[in-house]
Amino acid sequence: MFSKILIANRGEIACRIIHTARRMGIATVAVYSDADRRALHVQMADEAVHIGPAPAIQSYLVAEKIIEACHRTGAQAVHPGYGFLSERSSFVEALDGAGIVFIGPNRRAIDVMGDKIASKKFASDAGVSTIPGYLGVIEDAEQAKEVARQIGLPVMIKASAGGGGKGMRIARSIDQVAEGFTRARSEAAASFGDDRVFIEKFIENPRHIEIQVMGDKHGNAIYLAERECSIQRRNQKVLEEAPSSLLDEHTRRLMGEQAVALARAVDYDSAGTVEFVCGQDKSFYFLEMNTRLQVEHPVTELITGVDLVEQMIRVAAGEPLALRQEDIRINGWAIESRVYAEDPSNNFMPAAGRLRTYRPPAQEQRADGITVRNDTGVYEGGEIALHYDPMIAKLVTHAPAREQAIDAQCEALDSFAIEGIANNLSFLSALMHHPRWRSGQLSTGFIAEEYPDGYKPAQPEGDMARRVAMVAAVLDRCLHPVALNDGNCAEVVVRLADARQSLSISGGAGQWLVRFDGDSNEHTIQSDWLTDEPVWRGLIDGRRVVMGVDISREPYQISYAGTRSSALVLRPREDELLALMPEVQSEAGTKSLVCPMPAMLVSLAVKVGDQVKAGTALCVLEAMKMEVSLDAEADAVITRILAKPGDKLAGGDIIMDFA
């Protein structure tokens, strides 16, 4: 076994690997760029080596610097995590030449399975069910259109060296094929240094299900059940769960056996994932094989009890798998939410900046069978850098049954406090409460279908609104005990947007009684909340309730169960007077295109003097390894352009003006 390993990665996956290595008694070496000098993985590792400037191409992607760090520290092996160098056979070759072990699969497996075109040909030859498509490299947009006509629309245009949803476009018309080809190739070149793309038939209403495999260097290979990753946006996974609500035991076994057969065919000797696109009828087709650890691996670990990182390390050290297929059992259900620095209400634009507040829910294993796990690489006061993926954390819950795991995830999301940077917590919570998600009626088009006009936080209604109003009244009583303590009972009006709730509240010292006007029922509220806590926890009529609260200004901001409210608490006379106040008229809409986040301007699609229609593409930005098109919101004339391709823009910078 190794005594010291180096982790050629950053963020939450580097921290995740360190946890297992520490438990195994293995010393760890972190590497870091200028931007990550104070990062959590650097603080956690036994040693840390600086490897260059912030851009990954000058630091984390430079194999020579990783090898030099190994020689300097005496690290015997390298775990690549995912992304960066994890699927580059040239890196494995360089490590071999330096006498350093790669904690991952052999070069042949990476070469064959890491290339999507080659892997599909190989899988087809091996008898694995594959999607109809053109497996050669598409040379130009005209060829792309011709291939699409032959296959039949809709089609998926994909980067051969792609992953993580990058370099992928769905085309439902021939015009979209040409545009998608250009975008996919450009994004592939920027993300992977390889602009090859191919085209395959797009399966309508599909589900994305993947099989976790593990092989060793002695010819053994097993599968560890499946994960469902159908909830995606821009082909990027948002929620994952294990097992899948679609599969029965027979289909699971067929998919698992095909995945293992493919792994054996390439002598696969590490953790890997065989991904399938599945029809609602349980038909399945090979999609790709990821020759690395997956982002969503924690859900598999929780339902099987197998530490995949530990198995990777042991296999790399030459140990045979101690597990056999008959040892693998599915225990309960696990749900994972990817917490990102992004603004869901602004087309999910990525964000960067400092985490003024970062307080995740407590990691725990409860007596009722609930487990809460939070894999992260950040801390309060730390920074989300512009140069890398905007993931903040992976929040995972495990329970005996799917509904219980979802309920635990709902509570954990409401318990998660992040301030100082845009994040997707409210969106994740809304997904968790969505009836279609809870029923398991999933497809990869879920988000586009359920949020066709984009996501906006909903206002609470019904009983949910009443609970929010009660908590708002309690918050106000805690903050203004003198003002509301008239005979120990106060009449208040809680305004939630345009809705009004009139109620009376009495009590204090952790227990309150609330009665709504016109309702004879009295509600009991218990909580030990302190005024500096960003999360309110308590019991309402004996039911556990958790809400995110921001009391730094009035109205109070309250997040609960996927809703977001501005709660203004008033005395009845104040409410009467406020009703007489004239409404403040909003200013006219902007006549400038403003950069929504720190980004680089990739290209301009217009020039000064152009008349554009609503929906016309104006420019393309690149931020956090993704290309984003900005479109005109209304008919206009371009009067001025203030940026040029290649410019690095800050959030709020004006790109162009309109008339």
Image (cartoon, rainbow, N blue to C red):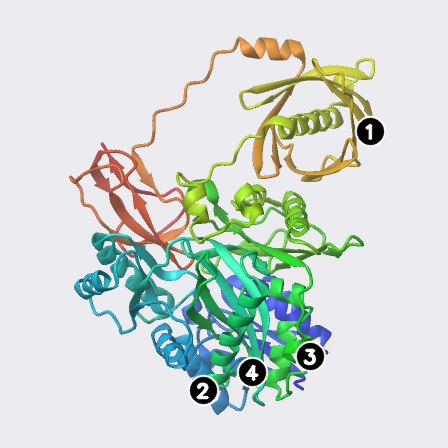
Using the numbered discs, state the Cα–Cα distance from disc 1 to disc 4 in whole angstroms.
59 Å
Given the image, on which type of amino acid does mark 1 rest?
Gln
Using the numbered discs, state the Cα–Cα distance from disc 1 to disc 3 in whole angstroms.
50 Å
Query: Is label 4 or label 2 in front?
Result: 2
Mark 2 and mark 3 lie on one chain; the one further toward the N terminus is: 3
Q: Would you call the spot at circle 3 few (<14 residues within 10 Å), some (14-19), or many (20 or more)? A: some
User: Which residue is the site of mark 1?
Assistant: 511
Given the image, on which type of amino acid does mark 3 rest?
Ile
Give left or right: position of 81 versus 541: left
Given the image, on which type of amino acid does mark 4 rest?
Cys
Q: Would you call the spot at circle 4 few (<14 residues within 10 Å), some (14-19), or many (20 or more)? A: many
* Residue 614, image x, y percentages: 25, 37
* Proximity of marks 1 and 2: CB atoms separated by less than 8 Å: no
Using the numbered discs, state the Cα–Cα distance from disc 2 to disc 3 in whole angstroms.
24 Å
Using the numbered discs, state the Cα–Cα distance from disc 4 to disc 2 in whole angstroms.
15 Å
Rendering quarter of residue 513: top right
